[in-house]
Every structure is written in C-alpha cells, then in structure tokens.
Amino acid sequence: MSKTQVELKIEGAHAAITFITDEGLNVLNSEVLHSFHAIVARIGGEPRIRTAVIHGTGKVFLAGADIKEMAKFTPAQGRAYAELGQGVFADLAALPCVTVAAINGPALGGGLELALACDFRFAVKSAKLGCPEVTLGLIPGWGGVGRLTKLIGQSRAKRLYLSGTPHSAEETLPWGLVDEVVNSAEDLEHRVAAFCKSLHRAAPSAVALAKRAARDMDEITPFAECFETVDSQEGMAAFVEKRAARWMEG
C-alpha cells in the first residue's frame, strides 16, 4: 500500500494541502482519499479561507489510484471505490473558496481527476497529464470523463481517455486543460502564490455564489442572494465612496 500522507497548513485566508510520500510517488488509495476528504471538509467549514492550493511532493503531483489495491476488486468493490472518489472530488469542486492544483510533475489517472475538480490548474511545462486507465483495462471512475469533456471538448477529451497517452502541460495549454505553465517547480510556487493573492480582492460570498452559479447553470438565484450579503453592501458602498472594499473575514 502507498505511504502517501496528506498535510494541511492554514495561514490566514490561505490553505495549502500537500501530498507527501517517502517513496517519491504519491498514490490515491482508499485511506488517502478518506484523509483528503476530511481536509476538504475542514476547509469547507472555515469561512475565513479564501484560497486553497493542492501540492504534490516527490517525483509526481499525483500518480492516480493505487493499482495494487484495485487488482483484486470485485465489481461491487469497484463501484464503492468509484463512489468514494466521486464523492470526495464533488466536495472539492463545491468548496466556496478558490482552489488551485499546483502540478509539479505527472498528474495521471486519479491525479488528473483531482486536478480537474479544482478551479484552476497551474503546471510546470514538462509535467505529463493523462488518463492511462484504458491501458490497464479500466476507465476513469472519479469524474474524469465528464469533467474533461466539459473542460476541453469531446474530441480532445476522447484523445486522452481513449488512448491512455499522456501529454505535456505545455501541449495541453491551448486546449484549456491547464490555465498556465511555468518553467520550474520554483516558478510554480511563486506564480501560484501571486495568483492566489490577486484573488483576495474579490468578495468571499460573491466568489462562492459565482462558483455555485457555474456548477448549477443558474445565475438568477445566486445573483438575487448576493443582496442578502454584507459583502454586497460593502462592495457597492466602497465603489460609491471611491475606496477599497473591506471584506468580512470569517
């Protein structure tokens, strides 16, 4: 079994989630998924958190599901594993804060599916992204087919999940699979930090409502709900008074 651990560090309005393993290969087995899910739930319960970045250490960002664990699955166990991963990533996608996957190396299979559940994906240009499941006689089970298709279109999505061939982050940038590419892991850290800082000028409640509008494909209801928030009163008052808005923290 993988020895991957998940760590959470909160500094002010920012959360950093890091996958770490002493073997240099981060893998998502059931235990790791449960640990990650608990961290996602904690972030969701912390109103002060504005941004959350997911990091991987070692050789890869995330290498995907644990093949050794899955090798003896029955169909019923496979269904339960798929439901577990889908639930975890659905909760990640539903977080009210902005989420960023900082892809320092290969993001494959479940690793890519986790990144797809984030709002943004920044990557070193050499990082490989792909869905190798079909080369194992499997298919993506944690939302990869649907999220890929929605993000980059059916044709390009099929190129990934029907061939199993990985592509570099630089190659997938024009597709919209990643939002930005950088040259090195050091550049990635600095760029993601600057990007997260730039997001803090937005009203927390408005960000959460905008994310919900995109998820539910309904702008009218969350737009109306904006007028119930202290943030909308402060934001419009600040505009009229020609000053910077002072958002509520927590």
Image: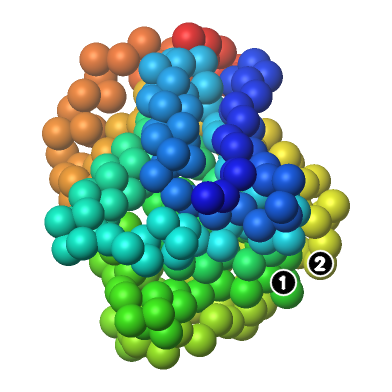
Instruction: List x then y, in percent, for residue 246.
Output: 56, 13
Instruction: List x then y, in percent, for residue 225.
Output: 21, 24
**Is the residue under label 2 in contact with that under label 1 (CB below 8 Å)?**
yes
| Identity, as a three-letter code, of the amino acid under mark 1 | Lys
**Image vertical order of residue 18 relative to residue 135, above or below:** above
Residue displayed at 19% across by 46% down: 216
Instruction: List x then y, in percent, for residue 77.
Output: 22, 54
| Identity, as a three-letter code, of the amino acid under mark 2 | Asn
Instruction: List x then y, in percent, for residue 52.
Output: 55, 34
Q: Earlier in the sequence, mark 1 or mark 2?
A: 1
Q: Alpha carbon of mark 1 to alpha carbon of mark 2: how far?
A: 6 Å
**Image vertical order of residue 181 relative to residue 91, above or below:** below
Q: What mark, if any, has residue 103 been given in the picture?
A: none
The residue carrying mark 1 is: 125
Mark 2 is surrounded, within 10 Å at the Cα level, by few (under 14), some (14 to 19) or many (20 or more) other residues, namely: few
Element on which disc 2 rests: loop
Q: Is residue 33 visible?
A: yes
> In this view, which residue lies farthest toward the front?
72
Element on which disc 1 rests: loop
The residue carrying mark 2 is: 183
Q: Quadrant of residue 106?
A: bottom right
